[in-house]
């Protein structure tokens, strides 16, 4: 989610048409709540603007728990996409690396296993200043970007699954 790459915070609301019927899940880590709540609010604002009415919001203890909760939301709550929101801030031990590694790999695995998008909205920063800059500060709000990505991916999946889009002769 490098801001210098492609920042979706400045998204075009018109581009999110046709998303109102999706059920979108949010799994939110309780660690570093100042950050995760700001990311959550950014994501919810996008979903509301896009007219998404069915939003399932659930808290989990920490980022490490995001993959499993995401998989539950996809498999058992019928969500079309999940936004996994967390904030891991480097401390003095190697814990940071283990939590980041498990969380990122687990989120990828959860989406692959359920065959539906799980959007990685976990900030992995060296300090709280970097996290603030990316959750409503000078680098935008990654929750906004994550919600745009969730809707884009849910819509893409729907389009690909729709046999009428498969082309002549198929
Ligand atoms: C244990 C821990 C630590 C040290 N740091 C963070 C963090 O910065 N961000 C976060 O979301 N969670 C942290 N956790 C908690 C773990 O993610 C997890 O909840 C616990 O290890 C219980 O499985």
Image (cartoon, rainbow, N blue to C red):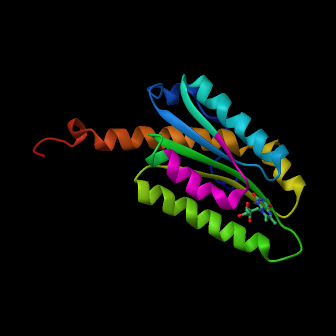
Residue depicted at x 58% and y 58%: 67
Q: Position of residue 132 (x, y in %)?
A: 85, 47
Asked if the magenta segment contains residue 70, the reply would be yes
| Residue in the image at 70% along x and 45% along y | 142
Q: Is residue 124 left or right of residue 137?
A: left
Answer whether residue 138 is visible to the viewer in this image. no
Ligand 1's image quarter is: bottom right
Front-most of residues 122 and 140: 122
The quadrant the N terminus occupies is bottom right
Q: Position of residue 37 (x, y in %)?
A: 77, 40
Q: Given the current orientation, which residue lies at the most extreme bottom position?
A: 94
**Residue 78 location, quadrant:** top left
Left or right position of 34 against 122? right
The magenta region covers: 58-73
Residue 164 position within the rendered picture, expressed as x and y whole percent measured from the top left:
21, 35
Q: Residue at x 52, y 45 (%)?
A: 73
Residue 35 seen anywhere in this rendered image of the structure: yes
Is residue 132 found inside the magenta-colored segment of the image? no
Magenta-colored segment: predominant secondary structure:
helix
Q: Nearer the viewer, residue 68 or 103?
A: 68
**Residue 111 vertical placement versus 142 (above, below):** below
Residue situated in front as seen by the camera: 130 or 2: 130
Q: Please give left or right for residue 67 compared with residue 125 in the image.
A: left
Residue placed farthest to the left in the image?
A: 169
What percent of the width, then of the height, locates residue 48?
Answer: 61, 24
The image quarter containing residue 100 is: bottom right
Q: Quadrant of residue 146?
A: top right
Q: Looking at the picture, does residue 1 appear above or below residue 58? A: below
Residue drawn at 53 percent across, 42 percent down? 150
């Amino acid at each position: 989610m490098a801001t210098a790459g492609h920042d979706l915070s400045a998204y075009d609301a018109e581009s999110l048409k046709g998303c109102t019927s999706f059920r979108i899940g949010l799994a939110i880590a309780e660690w570093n709540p100042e950050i995760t709540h700001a990311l959550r609010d950014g994501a919810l604002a996008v979903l509301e603007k896009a007219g998404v009415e069915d939003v399932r919001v659930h808290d989990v203890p920490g980022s490490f728990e995001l993959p499993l909760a995401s998989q539950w939301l996809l498999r058992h709550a019928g969500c079309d996409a999940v936004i996994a929101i967390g904030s891991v801030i480097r401390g003095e031990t190697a814990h940071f690396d283990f939590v980041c590694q498990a969380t990122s790999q687990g989120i990828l695995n959860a989406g692959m296993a359920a065959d539906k998008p799980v959007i990685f909205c976990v900030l992995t920063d060296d300090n709280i200043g970097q996290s603030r800059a990316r959750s409503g500060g000078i680098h935008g709000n990654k929750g906004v970007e994550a919600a745009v990505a969730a809707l884009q991916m849910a819509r893409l999946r729907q389009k690909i699954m729709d046999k009428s889009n498969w082309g002549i002769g198929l």
